[in-house]
Image (cartoon, rainbow, N blue to C red):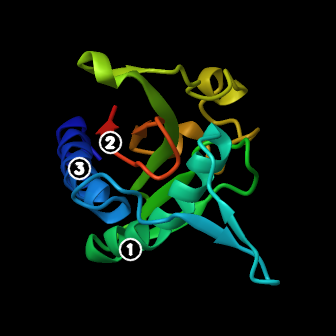
Amino acid sequence: MDNKTKTKLKEEFLKQLQSFANELDSYVSTQDDQWVIKWFIDVFKNIYTITSDTKIVSKVIEIHLFSRFLEFANKHEYKMIFSDKQNWYPDITFISKKDEQLKFAVDLKTTYITNYKEGKPYECNGFTLGSQGTYFIDRQSTKNIRFPYNECLGHYVLGILYERNHATKMRLIIKIV
């Protein structure tokens, strides 16, 4: 595949992903920024309030958005492959159903906004972009990665920023980098 075709396919996937990301806020929060998920319920019907702990919020958001990722994949004719292990890259690989050589890596990163009230909604608590794994150096490596890095046509981070004032509020800012 020539470079012009690769660039066109990467730009097309990026546009699809950006359009998808713009819809996610309305799925997880109401118009007045209330989070649609309020509690956990166990098998004994005990109800637990969701705290603002970043690990919990991040996992709940990812689980909640899973069905939306499936819709995105089906709409654009991709298969979704998830990492075998929690600390492997990427979180999701989208593989074209038409041409399985076309793979796009998407890593999900979630953190909270630190200065939303001060008019700086994009200042956030830091997050890592993953390990400096061997796959960055050796693009054919399979260590800590679902597919070798060089098998993916494009690599993207779907960044999810949320307001952490209390557990019932959920305002997401979702960006692709």
Dot label at residue 26: none
Are the two marked residues, 3 and 2, in contact with CB atoms closer than 8 angstroms? no
Q: Of helix, strand and loop, which one carries label 1? A: loop
Q: Quadrant of residue 50?
A: bottom right
Relative to 50, say whether 140 is above or below: above
Q: Amino acid at mark 1?
A: Lys
What is the quadrant of residue 102 in the picture? Answer: bottom left
In percent of width and height, residue 110 lies at 51, 39
Q: CA distance from mark 3 to mark 2?
A: 22 Å
Percent x, y for residue 21? 28, 51
Is residue 78 in view? no
Residue type at numbered disc 3: Leu
Q: Which mark is residue 9?
A: 3
Say which residue appears at 59% left-offset and 31% top-offset.
Answer: 139
Q: Nearer the viewer, residue 26 or 140?
A: 26
Q: CB atoms at circles 2 and 1 under 8 Å apart?
A: no
Q: CA distance from mark 2 to mark 1?
A: 26 Å
* Mark 1 burial class by Cα count in 10 Å: few <14, some 14-19, many 20+: some
Alpha carbon separation for disc pair 3 and 1: 14 Å
Can you identify the residue that label 2 sits on?
A: 174
Q: Residue at x 47, y 53 (%)?
A: 168
Q: Nearer the viewer, mark 3 or mark 2?
A: 2
Q: Residue furthest right?
A: 44
Q: Which class describes the residues within 10 Å of circle 2: few (<14), some (14-19), or many (20+)?
A: some
Tell me which residue sits at (60%, 66%) in the image: 39
